[in-house]
Image (tube, rainbow, N blue to C red):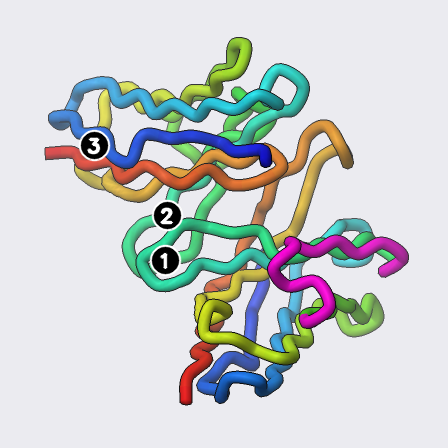
Amino acid sequence: EVQLVESGGGLVQPGGSLRLSCAASGFRFSSYWMTWVRQAPGKGLEWVANIKQDGSEKKYVDSVKGRFTISRDNANNSVYLQMNSLRAEDTAVYYCATRRGVVGLSNWFDPWGQGTLVTVSS
Amino acid sequence: SYELTQPPSVSVSPGQTARITCSGDALPKKYASWYQQKSGQAPVLVIYEDSKRPSGIPERFSGSSSGTMATLTISGAQVDDEADYYCYSTLFGGGTKLTVL
């Protein structure tokens, strides 16, 4: 069964750090770009970051550049999101997802994990 | 900056056809995908590359694209189809709440 399982969410104070993990199983993890998408309470989906199969390319939404770092460990079928200098507006459910398709032409996300909640508050 | 625009809400009666639109200037050059998100659950892919349906997605879900608009069509909508729907093409649209009652 193809599956993604996130962990690492929780309550953190503004300015603090958190590291999210996403464990993949049931597919050839090293063959795919991986993505983090977040959803603030009551709001829509927002793409956060992508990482290429070998980790050589990483892309971020402007609002997290310089604060968040995406990484992966293909030996352990895992992708991570290191979040530093957290702000209240980073409060969201964070989903990892497998990105499929042709880079620059056709991208879609399947499957998705169940999400992990990050709350930034004092 | 680039945007994808969706109507905030669409409402149909059971058995009717629901159409959810997504407009954006890059859609003539980039494929769109669609995601269904039921309350409290993770998103699920229902359409990719404008009109392709993943295995396990009911045939009543279909997609099309013309010019700057992509459309998700649910033929014979069911109560179980009530959800938020998001289009994606480089970024996500704002989402459309589908009500079936």
Q: Which residue is pictured at 46% across the width and 23% down the height?
A: B23
Q: Are marks 3 and 2 on the same chain?
A: yes
Determine which residue is flagged by label 2.
B37
Q: Nearer the viewer, residue A31 or B69?
A: B69
Determine which residue is flagged by label 3.
B78
Determine which residue is flagged by label 1.
B41
Q: Nearer the viewer, mark 3 or mark 1?
A: 1
Image spot of residue A32 (x, y percent): 76, 50
Vertical position of residue A86 compared to residue B93: above or below? below
Q: Nearer the viewer, residue B5 or B74?
A: B5
Give the residue type at disc 3.
Gln
Q: Earlier in the sequence, mark 3 or mark 1?
A: 1
What's the magenta region? A55-67
Image spot of residue B67 (x, y percent): 54, 10
For label 2, the SS is strand
Residue lying furthest top? B66
Image spot of residue A48 (x, y percent): 61, 57
Q: Residues within 10 Å of mark 3 (few under 14, many from 20)?
A: some
Q: Which residue is pictured at 49% across the width and 88% down the height?
A: A13
> Relative to residue A37, is residue B22 drawn left or right?
left
Q: Which residue is pictured at 58% across the width and 87% down the height?
A: A16
Q: Which residue is pictured at 36% across the width and 21% down the height?
A: B73
Circles 1, 2 touching at the beta carbon (< 8 Å): yes
> Relative to residue B16, is residue B88 drawn left or right?
right
For label 3, the SS is loop
Q: CA distance from mark 3 to mark 2?
A: 15 Å
